[in-house]
């Protein structure tokens, strides 16, 4: 089974701090994603990455950055945390779809990090 | 743009009742469709999937059929259990030629009472 591990289940930080959320996957997946989940809004994509050192903005990248120095690790960075970034953060990984058929693969999720910014 | 709409919850059922959670989609291409489940305090787990029209995905007694003519992928289970209480998300992706973009519905919370 695919294992996606997020470094913390619960995290409390203060406004203005730089916050790092870490995610590691063990299946050599090419693609990795960061989402935030808020009540009534579902999942919203923050950033994703197709390969080492590659990153693409999702729907709500403002206030965030990412780092992918190794294939198995994808880090989300809150440059200067604010209270409106209090949320559940979910990391996912995905094997690249078959190039011949284009059939997409499912995303596999970690257990999430519940981040509170005070 | 591509999107998923699923029925709003919460849904409350008694044990052994029949479950339907409706999901419809809008997509410009040929998406793959998924149902994910999120148990309390956990991340999302893939429940089932279907990659082309008329495919039926099934797992743990849950089923969903990819209906292209109605652009739907409704989740069903014949007899729910208390342990099925969770939030269910319908999702689509257009795959590697479309940036692997995955779109999720807002989620439907299911509570099953003994």
Image: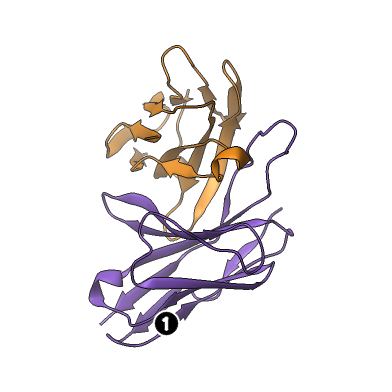
- B68 on left or right of A86: right
- A72 on left or right of A62: right
Q: Residue at x 58, y 33 (%)?
A: B49
Please tell me whether residue B47 is drawn above or below residue A61 in the rendered image: above
Q: Is A62 or A111 nearer to us in this picture?
A: A62
Q: Position of residue A93 (x, y in %)?
A: 61, 56
Q: Residue at x 66, y 67 (%)?
A: A52
Q: Position of residue B60 (x, y in %)?
A: 58, 34
Is residue B93 in view from this perspective? yes
Q: Position of residue B114 (x, y in %)?
A: 37, 39
Report the chain shown in purple. Answer: A
Q: Is B33 or A8 nearer to us in this picture?
A: B33
- A70 on left or right of A112: right
- Chain B as rendered: colour: orange
- B40 on left or right of A97: left
Label 1 environment density (alpha carbons within 10 Å; few <14, some 14–19, many ≥20): many
> What chain does badge 1 belong to?
A
Q: Position of residue A82 (x, y in %)?
A: 27, 78
Q: Which residue is mark 1?
A: A19
- The image quarter containing residue B10 is top left
Is residue A34 in view from this perspective? no
Figure quadrant of the C terminus of chain A: bottom left
Q: Residue at x 45, y 51 (%)?
A: B39
Please tell me whether residue A103 is drawn above or below residue A75 in the rendered image: above
């Amino acid at each position: 089974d695919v294992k996606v591990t997020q470094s913390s289940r619960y995290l409390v930080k203060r406004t203005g701090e730089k916050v790092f959320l870490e995610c590691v996957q063990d299946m050599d997946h090419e693609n990795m994603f960061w989402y935030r989940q808020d009540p009534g809004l579902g999942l919203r994509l923050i950033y994703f990455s197709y390969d080492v050192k590659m990153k693409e903005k999702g729907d709500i990248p403002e206030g965030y950055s990412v780092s992918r120095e190794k294939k198995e690790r994808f880090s989300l960075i809150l440059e200067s945390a604010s209270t409106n970034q209090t949320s559940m953060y979910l990391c996912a990984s995905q094997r690249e779809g078959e190039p011949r058929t284009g059939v997409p693969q499912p995303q596999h999720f970690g257990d999430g990090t519940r981040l509170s910014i005070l | 743009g591509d999107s998923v709409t699923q029925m709003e919850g919460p849904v409350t059922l008694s044990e052994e009742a029949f479950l339907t959670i409706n999901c419809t989609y809008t997509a410009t291409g040929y998406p793959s469709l998924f149902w994910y489940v999120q148990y309390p305090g956990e991340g999302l787990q893939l429940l089932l999937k279907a990659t082309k029209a008329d495919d039926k995905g099934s797992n743990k007694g849950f089923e969903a059929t990819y209906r292209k003519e109605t652009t739907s992928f409704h989740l069903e289970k014949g007899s729910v259990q208390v342990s099925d209480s969770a939030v269910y998300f319908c999702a689509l992706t257009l795959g590697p030629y479309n940036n692997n973009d995955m779109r999720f519905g807002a989620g439907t919370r299911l509570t099953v009472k003994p």
